[in-house]
Amino acid sequence: MSAHWRLALRGAAWIVVLTILVAVGVYLAFGVADAGSFVYGAGMGILSFVSMALTVSLLAGRPGVVMAMIGASSFFARLGFAAAVLAIPAYLGLWPVLPMICGFAGVYVAENILLLGMAPKIAGNPGARHDDEQNGAERKVGI
C-alpha cells in the first residue's frame, strides 16, 4: 500500500472516531435529528476525503495526458459529489442543515490537522519510500 493511501486510511479512521465522539455530544445537546444530520455530513466528508487519495493516485500514477485528464475529472467529480450530497438534503428539508454542514466542514478541518501531524511520520518512514528506492534503484541528478 502506498504512503498516501496509508495516510488517507489512517486519517479517515481517526476522523471516524472523532465523528462518533462529537455526534454523541451533539445528540446529548440537541437531539437525534441534529446528531443524524451531523453524522451524515461527516460521513460524506469522509467519503470525499478518501476519494482524494484516488485523485492523487490518478495524478501521480503513470504519466500521460489521459491520466492527467482522468485525475482532473476525478477532482471535479469530487466537488460535484460534495455539492450534491449537501444541497439535495438541504433543498428537500430532510434534516437540519447547520449540523450537516458543520459535520462536512469539520472533516476538512480535522483532515488538515491530522494530515499535518501524520504526514512527516509516514514520509520519513523508510517503509513508506517509493518502490524503486526500496529495490536499490538510484536516482540520477544532473548538476
Image: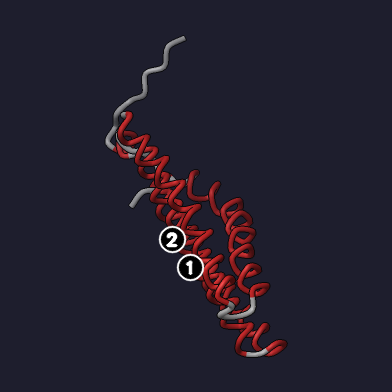
Q: Mark 1 points at which residue?
A: 13
> Which residue occupies the extreme front position in the image?
92
Residue pictured at 40% horizontal, 53% vertical: 5
Instruction: Give the colour scheme shown.
Output: secondary structure
Residue pictured at 64% horizontal, 59% vertical: 109
| Residue 22 location, quadrant | bottom right
Q: Which of 28 and 38 is in front in this view?
A: 38
| Residue 133 location, quadrant | top left
Q: Is mark 2 on a helix, strand or loop?
A: helix
Whether 109 is drawn above or below 126: the answer is below
Query: Residue 108, percent across and down?
Result: 60, 58
Q: Type of residue at label 2?
A: Leu
Residue 81: assigned label:
none
Query: Residue 52, percent across and down?
Result: 45, 51
Q: Are marks 2 and 1 in contact (CB under 8 Å)?
A: yes
Neighbour class for label 2 at 10 Å: few (<14), some, many (≥20)? Answer: some
Q: Which of 25 and 120 is in front in this view?
A: 25
Q: Mark 2 points at which residue?
A: 9
Q: What element carries label 1?
A: helix
> Which residue occupies the extreme right position in the image?
29
Neighbour class for label 1 at 10 Å: few (<14), some, many (≥20)? Answer: few
Q: Nearer the viewer, residue 110 or 97?
A: 97
Q: Nearer the viewer, residue 46 or 96?
A: 96
Tell me the CA gap for discs 2 and 1: 6 Å
Residue pictured at 59% horizontal, 63% vertical: 107
Residue pictured at 38% horizontal, 50% vertical: 54
Query: Residue 16, percent across and down?
Result: 52, 72
> Which residue occupies the extreme left position in the image?
135
